Amino acid sequence: MFERLAVHQRLCCGVLYLLAAGVAFTSETRRPCPQSCRCNNELLVNCSHGQLSTVPDNLWKDAKILNLTHNNIRTLVHQQFQTLARLLELDLSDNLLAIVEVEAFLGLQSLLTLRLARNHLKIIPVGAFAGLPNLQLLDISSNEILVFVDFTFRDLAALQCIKAADNDLVFISHQAFTGLTSLHELHIDGCNLTAVPTEALTQLSVLRSLHFHRLGLNALPNYSFHHLVHLKELVISHCPWLETLSGNSLFGLNLTSLTIRHCNLSAVPYIPLHHLVYLIYLDLSFNPITYIHGNLLGDLLRLQELHLVGGSLLSIGIGAFRGLTHFKLLNVSRNLLTTLETGAFQSVDALKTLGLDNNPLACDCRLLWVVQRRQYLEFGGHSPTCTTSLQLESWHFLDFSEVELPGLLTCRQPQILNRKPQGVKVDQGHTVVFYCNAEGEPLPYISWLNPQLRPLSPTGRIRTLSNGSLEVRYAQPQDNGTYRCVASNAAGNDSLHVSLHVQAFPSSSKNPLRLKGWFALPSASPGVNGNQKHPFDVKTLLIAAAIGFLSFFSSVSVCFIFMFFWSKSKGKIKHTATIAYVPRSAVSNSNGGKGNYMETSRFTMKLI
């Protein structure tokens, strides 16, 4: 009985199979599939890897998806797809396309997605996208496009996303994006672009996301995006020459996400960022940034995530994230950090994710808070590792037990090594160096305070040196006082006092000479009361007079010699001169007489 039932079931299955095959055969007869294509149903026509050199002619008119990828199509002619009025998606990626004629896509009035990626297009003619009133996504990435001319996309009023990454753009015309009234997302890759196409971007009034890749910029100029008032996401990546952001480069933007990756920024751009009060996500990864300074990011009130992976971070200052009450994620993996102190955060209780792996961490009391909060923190699957502590080398944070923690993660208070009183007396104008060496775990930081208890900086006449010493150059009487060396680390501090007494220049008690009026010179090193005597020095005066006389005599001699040789060059010179004159008596006699005759006299002079 069971055998009869099994045979009956097999017969039923066979009949059903023949019926299905017949229906499929009838359907294929009614709708023949183009050669080298696979037609699974009325929606999909798959002609990929078909070695086609042209678009097939007998395509289904009711097709919704057409896949022509990985073929040898070189040209799209006028009205190439005019019969496919119901097509929603067209993919021509990975072909040899070099020419797209005007109105090549005319008739695709329902098309939503057009992909032309990884071809050989160098320019797109105006009108190439005519007849695509409903297109929403255009992918022309990985081509060889050099320029976007005016009105290239004017027929795409419904377009929402353009992907044009990995091209060779050198210029974007000011009117290139005219007509893109609905564009929300734009990806541009132009390794030869040396300026942000600010004028062209002004046409994109509703743009929400802008991605720039491989720009040839060394600085981001002011007001680069000031018309993009609706922009929320800005991504700038792989710009190896981009070193700085001008102070107003992001002016006018209300971003929620900013990414500047794989560039050459050596510092966090605090000034350009300070007005971005709506910023939530900030990524500065793969930049040679060395420090995150304290109290400079407080204006980013809504910041929740900061990524700085693969940089050159040496230190994150105390108060670096102070004021960021919503801060939840910090990823500083693959840097040069030796520690991360709890004082950097507004509140470590709000922190949810911390990336610290691949840093040369010193496991001491400064990282105790990380271990204590390990059950509340996520480390992105990579636990931090101790690398600079010999006894804990290669240990993962999660390997510590609660019993081991107090004895392993410890710090030792600083201790200044040479505590002998240092008192120095020098004459005015000398240079003095005070030494201050300390030990502790971690290595203490050395700072100096002046007699008014103000911190001294590494610049100026009185300055701190990199080895912890204090240098007083050209000591002056006003430098007198007690200076304090302070050695500090996470476990506490230690201090040492040193004193300095500067002896002013001695004044002459015999015949002091004070210079007054315009002869008075300001003292190079004024005393405490501002009065400085200038002693009379006879020797100096004689030397100055001798130098002046020699200079005058040399000048006169040179002039005389020059006149002598100049006169010789004029040829033979007369050595006598005859002068005629009228004596006074002759003039009187002539006035009394009737005649006009006056007697004249002459005399001769000898010229030297």
Image (cartoon, rainbow, N blue to C red):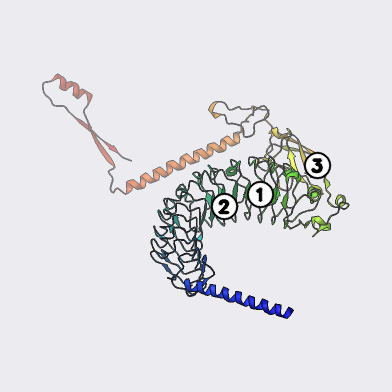
Which residue corresponds to the image point at 29% horizontal and 42% vertical from the top-left? 575
Instruction: Examine the rendered structure and indicate whether residue 527 appears above or below residue 407.
Output: above
Tell me the tag on residue 306: 1
Which residue is at the far front? 1
The answer to which image quadrant residue 496 occupies is top right
Q: Is residue 283 left or right of residue 374?
A: left
Which numbered mark, 3 or 1, is in the foreground of this view?
A: 1
The number of numbered badges drawn on the structure is 3
Q: CA distance from mark 1 to mark 2?
A: 14 Å
Which secondary structure lies at badge 2?
strand
Circle 3 Cα neighbour tier, 10 Å, few/some/many (<14 / 14–19 / ≥20)? some
Circle 2 Cα neighbour tier, 10 Å, few/some/many (<14 / 14–19 / ≥20)? some
Amino acid beneath label 2: Val
Ranked by sequence position, the earlier of labels 3 and 1 is: 1
Amino acid beneath label 1: Leu
Instruction: Examine the rendered structure and indicate whether residue 44 appears above or below residue 369.
Output: below
- Image coordinates of residue 273 in percent, x first then y, are 59, 44
Which secondary structure lies at badge 1?
strand
Amino acid beneath label 3: Asn
Ranked by sequence position, the earlier of labels 3 and 2 is: 2
Circle 1 Cα neighbour tier, 10 Å, few/some/many (<14 / 14–19 / ≥20)? many
- Image coordinates of residue 313 in percent, x first then y, are 68, 52
Which secondary structure lies at badge 3?
strand
Residue denoted by label 3: 493
Ranked by sequence position, the earlier of labels 1 and 2 is: 2
Residue denoted by label 2: 235
- Image coordinates of residue 602 in percent, x first then y, are 22, 33
